[in-house]
């Protein structure tokens, strides 16, 4: 019977494997089909201009999208890639990876600043071969800030970012001091070309007019079409690359807050399914949450099949540990595999680990309240005897001796103080209050309590 229950509960987790496989298959189709469609339209090899939007927070999902866009442009031997930048910035690490992608591409890049290219967006623009800005747009303000928007004062971080910005500027013949002034508030810089100076405590940003005067932009243009005309590419075929549905969903799912919420629901849901009978809502929610977590990171290009396999193996070990005790070995191995799967699926393993710890704490809190409410339905009740065998329910633990009270008999053995007495037609074990009574002496029952029968000599 126990084996049948064990098989049923393990079989309940088979849908998790199927769901993960379906999600990864759907992910591949959603991201590959649009790419093939675009590639098939590029019939005029070398005469196309690829226009790619950068109108979001600079993060890992954007990098994955740009990798696909540049791959398509290179396969089609496009003449140029135009990055339409309109962003407040984002992660420094993602910006550096995108900058490297731009530099290594065989297709030249022009950054068209639409409205703003702030912080990490400035760095992306500086890595382009040329910059064209929309009138009244701005570029700069590239200081390093934390998640709350406060300036980071760590000298090592500032020095690294100043160096990265300066090198990106020098690469295309721009003044590196101007790029450094966009990062470090302590830099003082005279800028007679634009009629103002950069004072200490300020972060430099440039308008479109100022950027052209300082050589940080080649032209101003009111639209991408006007920018193409300025570059002599107005007769080229324009291919607009847009994020696929899967990539849009992925950007949402890899958000740190969304990622943590998915881990909370995943851990709590699967744990509840393991300790509460039946495969119901908690298990479905948990599986879907973990599936969405790996789906988002797979599309973003961070998670491979090895991460999914580690997660599934981890769950399998944890489930087996519940029914086949292994002195904690399978539980430890399962936990390690689960943590490794979640961490390796993320672009930043440390952030993923922190999210996992936070999710685990929140999941434990959720489990505590749910278990308190449904404490009589958990799997642990299979191993705990909760029924009380009371007299009211008809259970009698021993024969009652109350009916012997007041009756007289004879000590069959010496009572020292325990022994045997003949009372009526039965021999029973008795005790005295402490005194010695020789055998054959008459005795009387003076107290009967539970299994104790107390006598005294008559």
Image: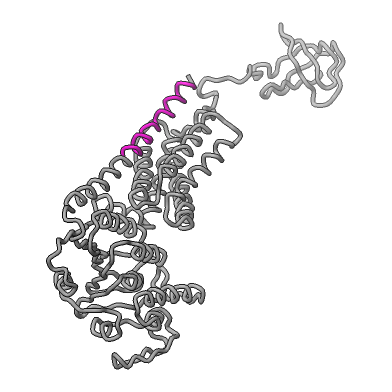
Horizontal side of residue 290 vs 429, given as left or right: left
Residue 410 in magenta stretch: no
Q: Nearer the viewer, residue 34 or 243?
A: 34
At 38% across and 35% down in the image, what residue appears?
Answer: 17
Examine the rendered structure and indicate whether residue 199 appears above or below residue 346.
below
Q: Nearer the viewer, residue 318 or 301?
A: 301
Give the quadrant of residue 67: bottom left
**Colour scheme of this structure image?**
one colour
* Residue 196 x, y percent position in the rendering: 32, 92
User: Is residue 271 in view?
Assistant: no
Q: How many marks?
A: 0
Q: Nearer the viewer, residue 436 or 63?
A: 63
Q: Which residues are magenta?
A: 3-22
* Residue 160 x, y percent position in the rendering: 47, 73
As drawn, which residue projects farthest toward the top?
A: 425
* Residue 96 x, y percent position in the rendering: 40, 66
Horizontal side of residue 39 vs 234, given as left or right: right
* Residue 157 x, y percent position in the rendering: 48, 72
Give the quadrant of residue 427: top right
* Quarter of the rendering occupied by the C terminus: top right
Q: Nearer the viewer, residue 432 or 372?
A: 372
Examine the rendered structure and indicate whether residue 146 appears above or below residue 26.
below
User: Is residue 98 in view?
Assistant: yes
Examine the rendered structure and indicate whether residue 369 appears above or below residue 140.
above
Specify the principal SS of the magenta part: helix
């Amino acid at each position: 019977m126990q084996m049948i229950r064990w098989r049923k509960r393990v079989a309940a987790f088979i849908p998790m494997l199927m769901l993960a496989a379906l999600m990864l298959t759907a992910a591949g189709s959603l991201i590959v089909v649009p790419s093939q469609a675009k590639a098939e339209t590029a019939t005029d090899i070398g005469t196309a201009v690829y226009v790619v939007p950068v109108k979001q927070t600079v993060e890992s999902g954007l990098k994955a999208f740009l990798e696909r866009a540049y791959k398509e442009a290179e396969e089609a031997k496009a003449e140029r890639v135009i990055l339409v930048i309109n962003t407040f910035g984002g992660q420094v690490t993602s910006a550096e990876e995108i900058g490297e992608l731009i530099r290594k591409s065989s297709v030249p890049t022009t950054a068209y600043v639409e409205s703003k290219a702030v912080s990490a967006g400035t760095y992306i623009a500086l890595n382009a071969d040329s910059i064209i800005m929309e009138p009244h747009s701005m570029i700069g303000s590239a200081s390093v800030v934390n998640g709350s928007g406060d300036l980071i004062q760590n000298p090592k971080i500032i020095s690294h970012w100043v160096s990265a910005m300066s090198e990106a500027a020098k690469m295309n013949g721009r003044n590196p001091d101007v790029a450094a002034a966009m990062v470090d508030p302590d830099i003082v810089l005279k800028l007679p070309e634009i009629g103002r100076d950069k004072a200490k405590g300020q972060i430099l940003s440039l308008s479109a007019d100022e950027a052209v005067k300082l050589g940080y932009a080649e032209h101003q243009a009111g639209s991408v079409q006007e920018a193409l005309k300025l570059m002599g590419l107005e007769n080229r075929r324009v291919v607009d690359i847009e994020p696929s549905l899967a990539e849009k969903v992925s950007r949402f799912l890899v958000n740190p807050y969304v990622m943590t919420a998915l881990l909370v629901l995943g851990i709590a849901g699967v744990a509840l399914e393991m300790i509460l009978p039946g495969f119901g809502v908690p298990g479905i929610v948990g599986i879907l949450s973990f599936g969405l977590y790996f789906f988002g990171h797979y599309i973003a290009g961070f998670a491979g099949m090895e991460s999914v396999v580690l997660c599934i193996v981890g769950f399998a070990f944890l489930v087996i540990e519940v029914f086949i005790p292994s002195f904690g070995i399978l539980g430890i191995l399962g936990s390690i595999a689960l943590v490794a799967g979640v961490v390796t699926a993320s672009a930043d393993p440390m952030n993923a680990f922190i999210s996992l710890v936070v999710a685990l704490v929140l999941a434990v809190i959720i489990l505590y309240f749910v278990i308190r409410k449904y404490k009589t339905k958990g799997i642990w009740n299979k191993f705990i005897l909760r029924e009380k065998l009371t007299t009211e329910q008809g259970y009698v633990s021993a024969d009652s001796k109350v009916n012997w009270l007041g009756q007289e008999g004879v000590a069959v053995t010496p009572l020292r103080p325990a022994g045997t007495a003949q009372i009526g037609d039965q021999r029973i074990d008795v005790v005295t209050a402490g005194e010695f009574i020789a055998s054959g002496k008459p005795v009387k029952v003076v107290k009967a309590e539970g299994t104790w029968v107390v006598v005294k000599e008559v």
